[in-house]
Image: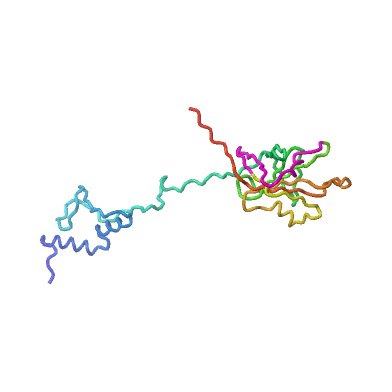
Amino acid sequence: MTQDHRSPQNASARAAAVRSSHPMNRRRAAGLIAAIAGVGFIPLRDSRGQETDPDSTPSSSIQSNTVGEVPTTGALRPGPVGQPPPRPTSLRTTPTAIVSDKAQIDAEIEALQIVDGVMQDPTGPWVVSWYEQTAQLGEPGNVVMAGHVDYWGVGPSVFYNVTDLVEGDEIRVTGGDASIHTYGVEWIQTVGIEDLTSGRIAEFVSPTPGQALTLITCGGEFDYVSGEYLSRTAIRANFTGVTRESPSTPES
């Protein structure tokens, strides 16, 4: 036989029954939140800051019986604090100048194209051409450049002494952002025109997994009948470091 649920003496039992039958009572919710947040359990407090007693007579103040938002455990949160860090600005830059003390090179660089598989000729005796279809400074790949070994009406030109380079010699290339990229010579090869198959040319100009620099010029004997050199010389150098200007301190 059931008892009268409206009798005062059953108020505590009724409150306990309601709490135990609710799928997520306040103490279970608090315990779950504390476990997720990774902190110790803290007794819930009522709106007046006093600890609640499950056996005490409920106060007349209105209390929320809903579960609040679970605290974060370190995952990304909305707002400025939780936003992902900005991606670093790209450090690649177009080459603007090249220097090699050993090969006596100190020249500006122009940007040219590879058209229908043919590299455009440098426009003058003292300028070095960089081909825009190849890599830029500061990114993985092969930075391909060309220069004249000599020039009609001028004589020895910008790449006249590249064959003096040996393994380990330093080549410095300046970028448009004033950074200086340093390369160390790995090898130098001179190949006859008749041996310049597409596969051999690809060895010189194809992309590389790391940062590399390839210089190409004419070489070998000069054929006065055809008016051209009978060989091509290629120098491969590998990236060894970069120097960047420190940002200037703003004037006060």
Q: Residue furthest bottom?
A: 1
Q: Where is residue 176 in the image (x, y as percent from the top left)?
A: 63, 39
Q: Is residue 91 magenta?
A: no
Q: Which colour scheme is used?
A: rainbow
In the depicted structure, whether residue 171 falls above or below residue 17: above
Provide residue 132's location: percent of width, then percent of height. Answer: 68, 46
Image location of residue 182, percent across then percent down: 63, 42
Q: What stretch is highlighted in magenta?
A: 154-182
Left-right relation of 117 to 85? right
Quarter of the image where the N terminus is located: bottom left
| Residue drawn at point x = 16 percent, y = 52 percent | 59
> With respect to residue 124, does 40 lie above or below?
below
Rendered image quadrant of residue 103: top right
Pinpoint residue 62: horizontal percent, then vertical percent: 21, 52
Taking the magenta stretch, the answer to whether it contains residue 173 is yes
Snapshot quadrant of residue 199 = bottom right
- Residue positioned 71% across, 47% down in the render: 235
**Residue 143 in sight here:** no
Is residue 233 visible in this depiction of the protein?
yes
Nearer-the-camera pick, 54 or 184? 184
Instruction: Identify the residue shown where x is 72% and y is 42%.
Output: 129
Give the number of callouts. Answer: 0
